[in-house]
């Protein structure tokens, strides 16, 4: 089934989640509501809620319970984006002005804090401490991932392992627990919850590697921002690290990256992009994304053959191969 | 009993909490550990942990349980301070460099996020969802309070009610739930927990009003920062609002505040301080702090006459009258 068809099938429940998301950030405080709502309207694929819902199909699916997991996970994702935009000095995201550029950094920081808080207030309505524990531990790891990203800015000497650890914390973990918590909240058994965690983790890794590839390969129209944004911010991704391992390319690429770093993000990325696009790094990174995709699909093998399993498989395939 | 004697009596347990605080922020990530530890070492009165412990005396006091409330509450307080320092552009706090000045704003933002996360990871070890609910709701209110402070910067036309609502969210709430959660975690009955909440809320209000008075009246030695810091940041506190209500002073004071605002925090606060110090606002604010103190002490009246009750009464007295 195509991704759009899966979304269409789940539309009713996803719409309910969308409504709850909108209500969740409405507060007495106009500015906080405005900034959060602006953020919500900027959209996003709501992939985490979708994973929660599909994972919930492996237990006793109750929307009322699952949305208390799905909404907080999407809110945490959103809050981390607002704080990211402060760090990355981003003016736009998905073609919309960021909170930090529409208002300012201070508003963006507290809007993020506020959304984190709202996420917790909703998830704690479920009286299952295990869910609270898993979520709070993931939040700590996500912060460590964010800090590692700052530490590693423009560091072309970092290891591949370092990159993988970072995207694990930054991206894969939240997707992993989206699947795991969907299962736990719906009372699926421990084995199913663990399988779904592993599925989510591997899909998350594939997703981020693909995202990093798209930033190098995509057109502005496809990815909603100029290609090469990662290099401009100093975010040294997998294909770049792989290209740096090619002796014939390393020096020239390093020079280009040095220039971009010296320009404080204003520099031209065209030459760096050309070098990377012609390197073997692209193919190797694509292979790695495919390998994670296959591991994700393997993780589902012990689960009952319900439609949700087929849907998750299709999503894994889409995530690893997508062009937008 | 004097405050120092109360601290001395509780020293063993407070030291245990101090140790757990230090361990709690140690992570694989050197920079996060360093920034958090720097913050911890800058100290503070640890008044929230003290309130947790004393409130725990109204149930079955177990340090092992209470520290899982006390440590998170102190961490949340610390995290809010790091984020505050970003907003306030503060170079020092309690005579120490702030995280944002020792490192930078980005590090400060993520250090705050990380400490919030750690706080949640610890409190969720207690399998009582009610505790998680109370804490997360308080975090949301605190963020709203912080945003209100930004909105109200340099607004001398705001109402007294507005000021009171803001300090309620910014300060009183966290102290209120320190008392409430200490009671709940130790299994004290609902009535006791509610009484202690009301005690904490009123002490918190008295505490903040006194803090705001000290910023206007204290010497740099007493308060660890130059007096008038609040005005310089645009934080219009109760005595200032009261002074603005005196027709003979309003225009001159407004002029001075305008100059300070125009100077972007570099201006001289001496004349503004002189006007405020000579106003009736000081005395009225002191009276209000005393009134909150009395309400706090009243809130304890239904509780059993154990030593902790006497200690809380003494702390309330100290908080409302202190000179440092």
Image (tube, coloured by chain):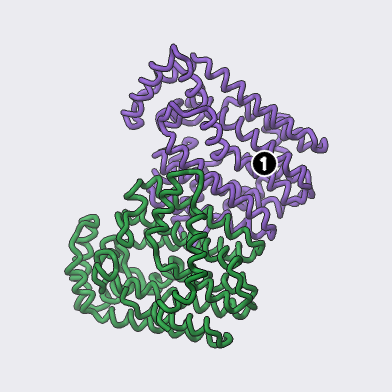
Chain colours: A purple, B green
Residue A139 drawn above or below residue A255: below
Q: What's the chain of the residue with tag 1?
A: A
**Residue sitting farthest toward the front:** B12
Q: Quadrant of the C terminus of chain A?
A: top right
Whole-percent x, y for residue A59 in the image: 78, 47
Q: Is residue B261 visible?
A: yes
Q: How many marks?
A: 1
The structure residue drawn at horizontal position 60% and vertical position 47%, both measured from the top left corner, is A73
Q: Can residue A23 be seen in this view?
A: no
The structure residue drawn at horizontal position 48% and vertical position 41%, both measured from the top left corner, is A146
Whole-percent x, y for residue A177 in the image: 65, 44
Q: Quadrant of the N terminus of chain A?
A: top right
Whole-percent x, y for residue A290 in the image: 64, 24
Front in this rendered view, residue A196 or A57? A196
Whole-percent x, y for residue B217 in the image: 25, 74
Left or right: residue A308 versus residue B305 is right
The structure residue drawn at horizontal position 66% and vertical position 64%, both measured from the top left corner, is B128
Front in this rendered view, residue A77 or A189? A189
Residue A51 lies in what quarter of the image? top right
Left or right: residue A306 versus residue B301 is right
The structure residue drawn at horizontal position 63% and vertical position 75%, both measured from the top left corner, is B60
Residue B69 lies in what quarter of the image? bottom right
**Residue sitting farthest toward the top:** A248
Left or right: residue A59 versus residue A147 is right
Q: Label 1 neighbourhood size at 10 Å, few (<14), some (14-19), many (20+)?
A: many
| Secondary element at tag 1 | helix
Residue B249 drawn above or below residue A12: below
Residue B203 lies in what quarter of the image? bottom left
Residue under numbered circle 1: A50
């Amino acid at each position: 089934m195509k991704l759009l068809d899966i979304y269409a099938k789940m539309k009713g429940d996803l719409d309910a989640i969308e409504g709850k998301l909108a209500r969740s950030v409405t507060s007495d405080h106009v500015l906080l509501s405005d900034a959060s709502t602006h953020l919500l309207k900027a959209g996003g694929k709501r992939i985490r809620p979708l994973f929660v819902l599909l994972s919930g199909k492996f237990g006793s699916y109750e929307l009322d319970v699952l949305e208390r997991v799905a909404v907080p996970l999407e809110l945490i994702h959103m809050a981390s984006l607002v704080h990211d935009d402060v760090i990355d000095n981003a003016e736009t995201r998905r073609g919309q002005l960021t909170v930090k550029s529409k208002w300012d950094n201070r508003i963006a920081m507290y809007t993020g804090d506020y959304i984190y808080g709202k996420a917790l207030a909703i998830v704690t309505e479920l009286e299952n401490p295990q869910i609270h524990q898993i979520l709070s531990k993931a939040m700590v790891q996500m912060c460590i991932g964010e800090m590692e990203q700052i530490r590693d800015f423009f560091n072309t000497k970092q290891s591949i392992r370092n990159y993988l650890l970072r995207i694990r914390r930054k991206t894969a973990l939240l997707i992993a627990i989206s699947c795991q918590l969907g299962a736990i909240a719906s009372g699926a058994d421990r084995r199913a919850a663990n399988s779904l965690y592993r599925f989510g983790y591997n899909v998350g890794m594939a997703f981020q590697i693909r995202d990093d590839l798209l930033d190098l390969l995509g057109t502005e129209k496809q990815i909603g921002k100029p290609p090469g944004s990662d290099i401009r911010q100093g975010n040294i991704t997998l294909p770049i690290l792989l290209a740096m391992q090619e002796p014939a390319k390393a020096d020239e690429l390093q020079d280009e990256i040095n220039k971009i770093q010296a320009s404080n993000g204003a520099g031209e990325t065209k030459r760096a992009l050309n070098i990377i696009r012609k390197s073997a790094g692209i193919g190797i990174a694509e292979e790695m994304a495919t390998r994670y995709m296959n591991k994700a699909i393997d993780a589902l093998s012990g689960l009952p053959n319900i439609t949700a399993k087929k849907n998750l498989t299709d999503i894994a395939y889409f995530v690893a191969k997508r062009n937008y």
